[in-house]
Image (cartoon, rainbow, N blue to C red):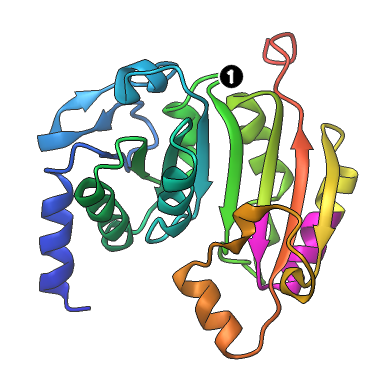
Amino acid sequence: MSRRNKLAKFAQLLSFPNVYENFDDGDAQLSGKDGEQCNLKGNWASGHFGNDKPIVLELACGRGEYCLALARKFPDKNFIGVDIKGARIWKGAKIALEEGLDNVAFIRTRIEQLTQFIGANEISEIWITFPDPFLRKPNRRLTAPPFLDRYRQMLQANAVVHLKTDSPELYEYTLLSVERYPHATLQYEDDDIYAKDLPIPELVYKTYYEKMHLAVGKTIKYIRFGLQALDPVEDQ
């Protein structure tokens, strides 16, 4: 993609009512449509979506394929896709607007910053779809303990986290991470989900990158685990 094309998409993102951005670690404000500053922390359901439906996060959402597919399937839920790549988010946000999917929003930011913008007990479920496995930097993997600590700050009771990946390294790492993490409970794991009946129907949706992985013969792996919400006493 040319630099000019990327810049055009970045500029158009500023006009989208379903996209919020922040790149400043020291600033808890998000920039919404036309650069308007807003603070939705603790108020996403009513402040953006205008309802009290459960909110599901898709992390490393890329073009937002999972957000879009799940939003079509589950109109009784709200979905927020998170990614740092603006040109990718532009694709998903544009489709959501064209289809009138008002239960989808996007945050363009680093996942490390999410707790600045999302409050306690706001998230019912997390999907992590084909993230970078960071083969040389395990601490940056989205199932590393520091990330699990962050997720707990946003989750409701009985929340679940889903990981879908082609990476055997990330798959094995996550199993070990969940086993060792005191607030996580493994619910399901499978190192080749398409070799048998799918355990949940939501796994049928395929992202752009998943299709690429399948085309070269890679197997798709899935882990689901429960993650205990942060106790207010722990946060003191």
Query: What residue sits 27% from the left and 60% below the top?
Result: 91
Residue nearest the viewer, comparing 195 with 148 = 195
Q: Position of residue 140 (x, y in %)?
A: 61, 56
Query: What residue sits 37% from the left and 31% below the top?
Result: 26
Rendering quarter of residue 30: top left
Q: Residue furthest bottom?
A: 216
Compared to 100, does 198 lie above or below? Answer: below
Rendering quarter of residue 164: bottom right
Q: Is residue 175 left or right of residue 105?
A: right
**Residue for badge 1:** 121
Residue nearest the viewer, comparing 130 with 66 = 66
Type of amino acid at the residue the image marks with label 1: Asn
Rendering quarter of residue 109: top left
Q: Quadrant of the N terminus?
A: bottom left
Q: Quadrant of the C terminus?
A: top right
Q: Position of residue 52 (x, y in %)?
A: 44, 17
Stretch in magenta: 163-175
Work out whether residue 110 can be spotted.
no
Q: Position of residue 114 (x, y in %)?
A: 47, 35
Work out whether residue 187 can be spotted.
yes
Q: Position of residue 102 (x, y in %)?
A: 30, 36
Q: Is residue 195 left or right of residue 165?
A: right
Say if the magenta span includes residue 176: no
